[in-house]
Amino acid sequence: MILNRTIDSYHFGFSLNLTDSQLCTLMDLFQSPNTAGASILGGRTSITHLQLDGIGSVVIKDFRRGGLMRYFITRRYLKFGKTRSQVEFESMHKLRQLGIRTPEPVAFAYRGFPLYCAWLVTREIEQSCTLAELNCQDVKRVSNIMDKVIEQIDKLVECRFIHVDLHPGNILLDADDNIYIIDFDKGHNYRGSRVSLRDRYLNRWHRAVIKHGLPGILTEMLQSGLN
């Protein structure tokens, strides 16, 4: 069940029973200046890490625009139906129930109408790195965990859910080589066939591998593993 609260024009939704003190801590962080960073295949989304009392380490995603629009409007979106942060929060909850590994969603928030800013709070996967980053450090380890990556992507296909930006930069590994898929912004149910969805995933993955100079074996292993 998703609980909703509004405090000082910030609208929150959360599945854990967050206190006013915890919500105010998040609000203070939302108001702090923050510059979007970038890493290999990491995109431009601004990410902040925080120790939230009673919850532990969390990651706050500040939604930022990409493409040409980012030169005119950096952070604001037109409110029409659910916000970007709410849609991603709900998608992650649904996918976790279906056996797909994502970081645990803690809360979503937005502020403003009709133009709004949005945030998503998830539990931090500690001591983690992306599959793209790991490839630059330990190629053998990448090869050993690709079966787990393929298993998770195959579950997305079976669930008919499209992750619009699935690539090695959106696959997290923790210290025990557990796999987590991140960045479900704009994700949605897919009405096409299983085969067409599988091919979309393979094509997006392959384009990212080529664009960022990653080894082609990443695509070959994924292609041979997906049914």
Image (cartoon, rainbow, N blue to C red):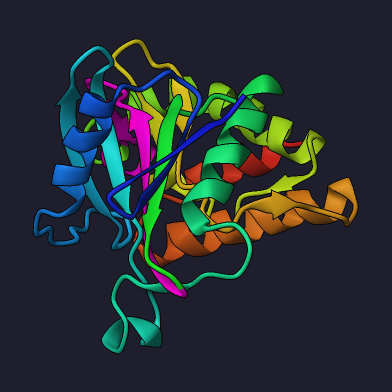
Where's residue 77, x and y in %? 44, 72
Asked if the magenta segment contains residue 122, the reply would be yes
Where's residue 94, x and y in %? 67, 31
Furthest residue toward left: 33
Residue at the location (45% across, 19% down)?
Answer: 16
Is the residue 127 above or below the residue 163 in the image?
above
Q: Quadrant of residue 151?
A: top right
Q: Quadrant of residue 204?
A: bottom right
Residue at the location (37% across, 31% down)?
Answer: 122
Foreground residue, 74 or 68? 74
Q: Which residues make up the magenta segment?
A: 114-134
Q: Quadrant of residue 98?
A: top right
**Can residue 99 be seen in the rendering of this structure?**
no
Is the residue 136 above or below the residue 67 in the image?
above
Residue at the location (52% across, 70% down)?
Answer: 79
Q: Is residue 68 left or right of residue 78?
A: left
Where's residue 206, x and y in %? 55, 58
Residue at the location (59% across, 57% down)?
Answer: 82
Where's residue 46, x and y in %? 24, 55
Asked if the magenta segment contains residue 120, the reply would be yes
**Can residue 121 be seen in the rendering of this structure?**
yes
Foreground residue, 95 or 108? 108
Is the residue 142 above or below the residue 110 in the image?
above
Q: Tell me the quadrant of the picture where the C terminus can be found.
A: top right
Foreground residue, 97 or 195? 97
Is the residue 149 above or below the residue 88 in the image?
above
Furthest residue toward right: 193
Q: Tell me the quadrant of the picture where the N terminus can be found.
A: top right
Q: Is residue 170 left or right of residue 159?
A: left
- Count the numbered circles shown: 0
